[in-house]
Amino acid sequence: MDTRKLRIVKPPLPAIGICEACNSQFKSCKRSQDEAEDEIKAAFDAHECKVMDSSQNTQRIVRG
């Protein structure tokens, strides 16, 4: 499996983070950018990547 990596994709607000390994999304509605990023990083650290089989991965790429 790919190395887990968090990507913050929508600063300033609402901030959204994506796990690049499994495409899970993490959102925050905090007003402060620092608080939002901290909340997203905590959610990312707590999650476990979902294993996808090849058909699910193809669907994810097509829906993009």
Image (cartoon, rainbow, N blue to C red):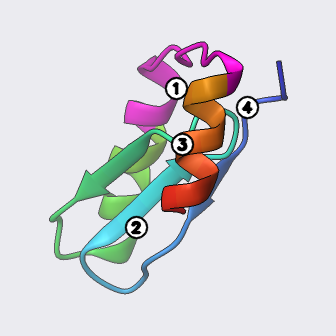
Give the residue at mark 1.
45
Instruction: From the viewer's perspective, tell me whether residue 53 is left or right of residue 45.
Output: right
Q: Is residue 46 magenta?
A: yes
Taking the spot 26% from the left edge, 75% from the top edge, the residue there is: 32
Depth order, front residue of 49/45: 49
Tell me the kind of residue under disc 4. Answer: Arg
Tell me the kind of residue under disc 1. Answer: Asp
> Which mark is in front, 2 or 1?
1
Graded by Cα atoms within 10 Å as few (under 14), some (14 to 19) or many (20 or more), the crowding at tag 3 reads few
Q: Which residues are magenta?
A: 42-54
Give the residue at mark 3.
59
Graded by Cα atoms within 10 Å as few (under 14), some (14 to 19) or many (20 or more), the crowding at tag 1 reads few
As helix, strand or loop, the secondary structure at mark 3 comes to helix
Taking the spot 55% from the left edge, 46% from the top edge, the residue there is: 60
Instruction: Find the distance from the CA under tag 2 to the CA under tag 4.
Output: 21 Å
Q: Which mark is residue 24?
A: none
Graded by Cα atoms within 10 Å as few (under 14), some (14 to 19) or many (20 or more), the crowding at tag 2 reads few
Tell me the kind of residue under disc 2. Answer: Asp
